[in-house]
Amino acid sequence: MRLPQKLFRIDTYLAAGEAFHFTRKDVPETPPLLEHDHDFFELMLVEQGQLHHWINGVEEVLEPGHMVFLRPADRHALQAVSGSGARIFNVAFRPDTADHLVDRYGDEIGGRFFWQSGALPVTLRLRGPQRERAVNAMLTLRTSHRSLARIEHFLLSVMTHVLDAADVVDDRAPAWLLAACRATREPRVFRRGVDGFLTAAGRSQEHVCRQARRYLGMSPTQYVNRIRIQHAAMLLAGTDRGLPDVAADCGFENLSYFHRLFREQYGTTPRGYRMRHRQDRAGQGPI
């Protein structure tokens, strides 16, 4: 579809003192009159129904739980699938907000989400608890003060809590990569490290690395290590197993390497993480 194009500007939507714009709206079934890009970032979540999404010259169908990380230069238009009752949440915010987040938290979010390069923006399909968390986060944002602190908190929460880092896979990823990601959730696979991922992918290492960076926003090694460290955190919080045993169960032979990766992912040592969760449980009192 080729439509007239228009640039949408963030200042059109923001009142004085506001740092973001929020909308929850029904998508019309009538064909769009124009295609637009913007001078701002957008986070879009499909709440219900189905809709046609024309994005950078490609047409795709979005369904409930699809979340799209739109960048300023992305050109798109929407149309509801007839009879589906499509409704979306949409959050728009200034580029300097995005710049601040990636400058400060680039080690964790850089090259992913809004900052992942490619012809198309990252599109994720959220299901189950992830989808519920995303909808609840949106509903909370709807009634909040539209301050800079609130939008930064919301975006960080979505990218680091709502979305499990190990499950963040672009919905357009090839089937073999999606299958490899699912397989790598299994201990028998992730214990082998990146070799397990490559075996599950069934492709050359160079090709897997290239596609992983494109659709996961990280290398295969980084992806597998995130899953292994998440498994370690679960064991530390829920069992009394010794640290060497926990590390070995996650496939780590080098304890120093295990400690370094854990601190990078959780901001504390494995022992500190366990102590914090024990204190949290003790503070809950009788049920």
Image (cartoon, rainbow, N blue to C red):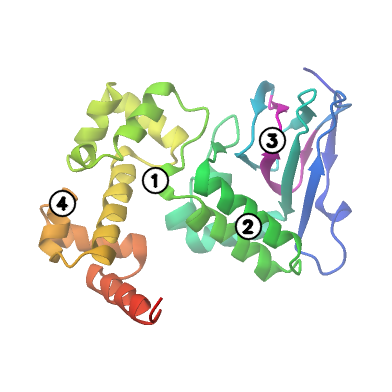
Cα separation, mark 4 vs mark 3, equals: 43 Å
Q: Secondary structure at mark 2?
A: helix
x, y percentage for residue 249?
15, 51
Q: Select label 1 or label 2 by which is in front.
A: 2
Q: Is residue 181 above or below residue 21?
A: above
Q: Is residue 93 above or below residue 177?
A: below
x, y percentage for residue 15?
87, 63
How crowded pointer 3 is (Cα within 10 Å; few <14, some 14-19, many 20+) is rated as: some
Cα separation, mark 4 vs mark 2, equals: 34 Å
Mark positioned earlier in the residue sequence (1 or 2): 2
> Badge 4 is on which residue?
249
Cα separation, mark 2 vs mark 3, equals: 24 Å
Q: Nearer the viewer, residue 280 or 91?
A: 280
Mark positioned earlier in the residue sequence (4 or 1): 1
> Badge 2 is on which residue?
137
The answer to whether residue 253 is seen in the rendering is yes
Q: Select label 4 or label 1 by which is in front.
A: 4
> Badge 1 is on which residue?
166
